[in-house]
Amino acid sequence: MPIDQNIKTEVKEQVTVFEHYSKQAYDLALEYAPKIVIGILVLIIGFWVIKQLGKLWERSMKRRGVDVSLSTFIKSLISIGLKVILLITVAGMVGIQTTSLVTILGAAGLAIGLALQGSLSNFAGGVLVLVFKPYKVGDTIEVMGQKGEVREIQIFNTILLTADNRTVILPNGSVSNSLIVNQSKQGTLRAVFEVSISNEFDTERVRKIILDVVNADKRVLGYPNESTVIATKVITSGYILQVRFFTTELDNSPTLADVIEHVNKEFIKRGIGEPTPRMVVYKD
């Protein structure tokens, strides 16, 4: 009998505990269920509103002619910021202490920031590139000892494609602090090469021959970018003429190669130089 009584007492205590926790769960459900439902609705509506604001931003920036890279970059930052604010707001509505949450997020952000200093530097560099536009996608630039066409401007890196088809990935932090030579900024580029001529040939005659060949190429630009041939140095056997002309950035290299070839052929045809004049090409 005493054993049965103990079992009954134990069962009764367990039932009492169960009823106690069941009542607490019921009370919590009654208290928080409406808040949770409202919070979910706010989240759904909030995400929809943020998405629509993103589309409105894109249309507005497109009408204003803002660069696509900059517009997309800022849109992503705004979207992430609004979503974080939305999540914190909903957490407060549900009953979570947002002060503690913000503190935790701040501490986590500080820890991540210290761990990713290099990445944050590249991120800041990407922002500077997109805002101040020292170059854009499609430009040919020289930076950090590399030269190529800008294919992408990412948040952390700039992607170049070199003339020999190599893909070069440059960190934006280093790029923004380096000397950048943008060959496409002005829309034109000067081509320069030198020709050594023997003393027996008249300078004016040679100059006219070269200019006729240069200006015959339709890719060579005229006024105000006049082509010139000037004597830059006197040497033992003669003199050196420097040839300068302008083309578009895209046409520069092929035009320079063709002009050199045609000038050389014209010299051979007219018997100028014995042997054929030596040409020296260098970067302007």
Image: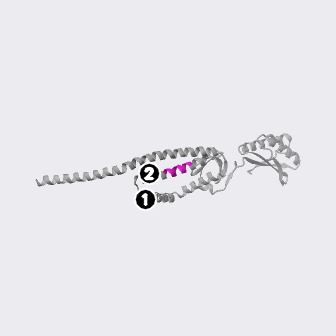
| The furthest residue to the left | 1
User: Where residue 188 appears, x then y in whole percent?
Assistant: 73, 47
Q: Nearer the viewer, residue 227 or 202?
A: 227
Give left or right: position of 236 versus 11: right
Chain part drawn in magenta: 75-83
Task: Assess disc 2: are there few (<14), some (14-19) or many (≥20) residues with their C-alpha within 10 Å of its C-alpha.
Answer: many
Judge whether residue 57 can be spotted in this image.
Answer: yes
Residue tagged 2: 90
Cα gap from disc 1 to disc 2, whole angstroms: 14 Å
Judge whether residue 168 can be spotted in this image.
Answer: no
As for residue 175 lying within the magenta part, the answer is: no
Residue visible at 58% across and 55% down in the picture: 124
User: Where residue 62 appears, x then y in whole percent?
Assistant: 62, 44
Q: Nearer the viewer, residue 68 or 99?
A: 99
User: Where residue 283 appears, x then y in whole percent?
Assistant: 73, 50
Q: Nearer the viewer, residue 271 or 138?
A: 138
Residue visible at 51% across and 45% down in the picture: 49
- SS at mark 1? helix
| Amino acid at dot 2 | Val
Mark 1 or mark 2: name the one nearer the start of the chain: 2
| Amino acid at dot 1 | Ser
Q: Main secondary structure of the magenta part?
A: helix
Task: Assess disc 1: are there few (<14), some (14-19) or many (≥20) residues with their C-alpha within 10 Å of its C-alpha.
Answer: few
User: Where residue 241 appears, x then y in whole percent?
Assistant: 82, 50
Q: Nearer the viewer, residue 120 or 22?
A: 22
Label of residue 100 in the image? 1
Q: Is residue 45 above or below residue 5?
A: above
Give left or right: position of 53 versus 260: left
Judge depth for marks 1 and 2 and give the one in front: 2
